[in-house]
Image (tube, helix red, strand yellow):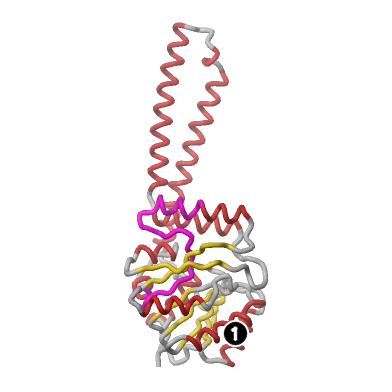
Amino acid sequence: MKPKYSFVIPIYNEESNIFELSKRLQDVAEQLDGTTEFILINDGSRDRSLILMRELHEKDSRFCYLSLARNFGHQIAVTAGLNFVRGEAIIIMDADLQDPPELAIAMAEQWRSGYQVVYAQRSKRHRENWLKRLYAYWFYRLLKRLADVDIPTDTGDFCLMDRKVVDVLNAMPERNRYLRGLRSWVGFRQTAIKFERDSRFSGERKYTFRKSFSLALNGIISFSRIPLRISTYVGLISAAIALIMACMVLYWRIVQPTAPLTGFATIHIAVFFLGAVQLVSIGILGEYIGRIYEEVKGRPIYILGEVGGFEDNQGLPQRLR
């Protein structure tokens, strides 16, 4: 029989968290009103994570696992898990236990009341430095202002989605995926559950500033054309400033030949300013062209190295059967 609930959990070097994670997931499963499966996705871990996932599967058949051939990134690992889910309600969460598994019970209640997307909204972040909190605060509000769709603030990938929503997401072929944005883009009835985000149970955080910045940039580029418009506006403003400066220099040359603003420094400042505007504009344009390049190559989004728990083929996507 197909399970009613499916948990999708990407894992990257989380061997110190897997035992506690499995224990809490099993406790949650006992409180849900239906059968449950847990899909663990090994995203190219270098520690014993895959070995522990195999052991979990041998002890409890509800634990299935996918092992990607290399590290494809968090968003792609979640996408792989969504391709394999068999449940009616799908919960996405991280393995570091900053997303409390127990919140899935409240999410399931909202789902049964008719909501098709129930996302967890962070009201507080424990043991995160002020710089990380400040960066996250302004990023989500900037994204909300720039995006073409209404992406809720202070929300990550931790959510419950109805099977209909997941089927729509699986039908989307794009490779540069920002799932919390796609989740908002598809629509359906959505609601939030507020929670306080815990600190990591064990180990070091995997999302470095560089990875967080890359994800943030991907979210903005994927759901907004405003950066392109900004570069156009800045170019027009720069052209207007350059025209005004040209008129002023011409005036001073004729009326006040000794004016200080006609000197070498003024020319240098104008050249550097216009050069910076051009380079920034080219960089923004390059981000969009790079995404077009990734899409048209048509490579698979991920490559599987090992699959456990889907031997009956019922959970395999059609293209893999």
- Give neighbour class at mark 1: few <14, some 14-19, many 20+ (Cα, 10 Å): few
* Above/below status of 138 relative to 8: above
Dot 1: element: helix
Looking at the rendering, the stretch of residues picked out in magenta corresponds to 138-166
Number of marks in picture? 1
Of residues 80 and 87, the one nearer the viewer is 87
* Above/below status of 299 relative to 40: above
Q: Quadrant of residue 34?
A: bottom left
Q: Position of residue 138 (x, y in %)?
A: 51, 51
The N terminus, quarter of image = bottom left
Q: Position of residue 152 (x, y in %)?
A: 42, 60
- Residue depicted at x 44% and y 53%: 143
* Above/below status of 29 relative to 228: below
Q: Quadrant of residue 251?
A: top left
Left or right: residue 151 versus residue 206 is left
- Residue depicted at x 40% and y 80%: 89
Left or right: residue 269 versus residue 107 is right
Identify residue type, mark 1.
Lys
Q: Is residue 228 magenta?
A: no
Q: Position of residue 293 (x, y in %)?
A: 42, 57
* Above/below status of 277 relative to 215: above
Of residues 125 and 54, the one nearer the viewer is 125
- Residue depicted at x 42% and y 54%: 144
Q: Which residue is mark 1?
A: 23
Of residues 85 and 149, the one nearer the viewer is 149
Q: Position of residue 205 (x, y in %)?
A: 63, 65
The C terminus, quarter of image = bottom left
Left or right: residue 271 versus residue 316 is right
Q: Is residue 141 magenta?
A: yes
